[in-house]
Image (cartoon, rainbow, N blue to C red):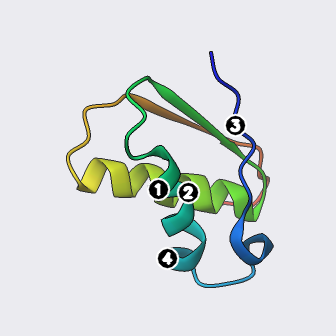
Amino acid sequence: YDLFVPFIYKRGNCNLEEAVEPLFQQLKNYNKPICLIGHSNGARIAYALELLFRHLGSKIPIMVISLSDVPL
């Protein structure tokens, strides 16, 4: 497996699209299953990234693990 700890734009203190876009650009050509793990706002970003992949019709399996105690 590959482990990737991304830089989060403005540490996530921005609108959701600004936080998700750089991550999407880095992962869009990755052709292996992806597991996104996020805590708090990072979980929100992970779910938004998974939704973007799904919306664009990606066939790559993506799992999201939320370490947040706040309902999204």
Q: Which amino acid lies under the numbered mark 2 shown in the image of this protein?
A: Leu
- Front of the two marks 4 and 2: 2
In this image, 35 relative to 24: left or right?
Answer: right
Quickly name the residue at label 1: 24
Quickly name the residue at label 3: 4
Q: Kindly report the distance in space between the C-alpha atoms of the residues bearing marks 2 and 1.
A: 4 Å
Mark positioned earlier in the residue sequence (4 or 2): 4
Q: Kindly report the distance in space between the C-alpha atoms of the residues bearing marks 1 and 3.
A: 13 Å
Extreme left residue here?
57
- Quarter holding the N terminus is top right
* Residue that appears at 25% across and 56% down: 55
Q: Kindly report the distance in space between the C-alpha atoms of the residues bearing marks 2 and 3.
A: 11 Å
Quickly name the residue at label 2: 23
Q: Do the numbered discs 3 and 4 sit on residues whose CB atoms are within 8 Å? A: no
Quickly name the residue at label 4: 17
Q: Which amino acid lies under the numbered mark 4 shown in the image of this protein?
A: Glu
Q: Kindly report the distance in space between the C-alpha atoms of the residues bearing marks 4 and 2.
A: 10 Å
Mark positioned earlier in the residue sequence (2 or 3): 3
- How far from the left and from the top, in percent, is residue 42? 71, 58
Q: Which amino acid lies under the numbered mark 3 shown in the image of this protein?
A: Phe
Label 4 element class: helix
Q: Answer above or below: position of 42 versus 32.
A: below
**Crowdedness near tag 1: few (<14), some (14–19) or many (≥20) residues, C-alpha within 10 Å:** some
**Crowdedness near tag 4: few (<14), some (14–19) or many (≥20) residues, C-alpha within 10 Å:** few
Label 2 element class: helix
Quadrant in the picture for residue 10: bottom right
Extreme bottom residue here?
14
Mark positioned earlier in the residue sequence (1 or 3): 3
- How far from the left and from the top, in percent, is residue 47? 52, 54
Label 3 element class: loop
Q: Do the numbered discs 2 and 1 sit on residues whose CB atoms are within 8 Å? A: yes
- Front of the two marks 3 and 4: 3
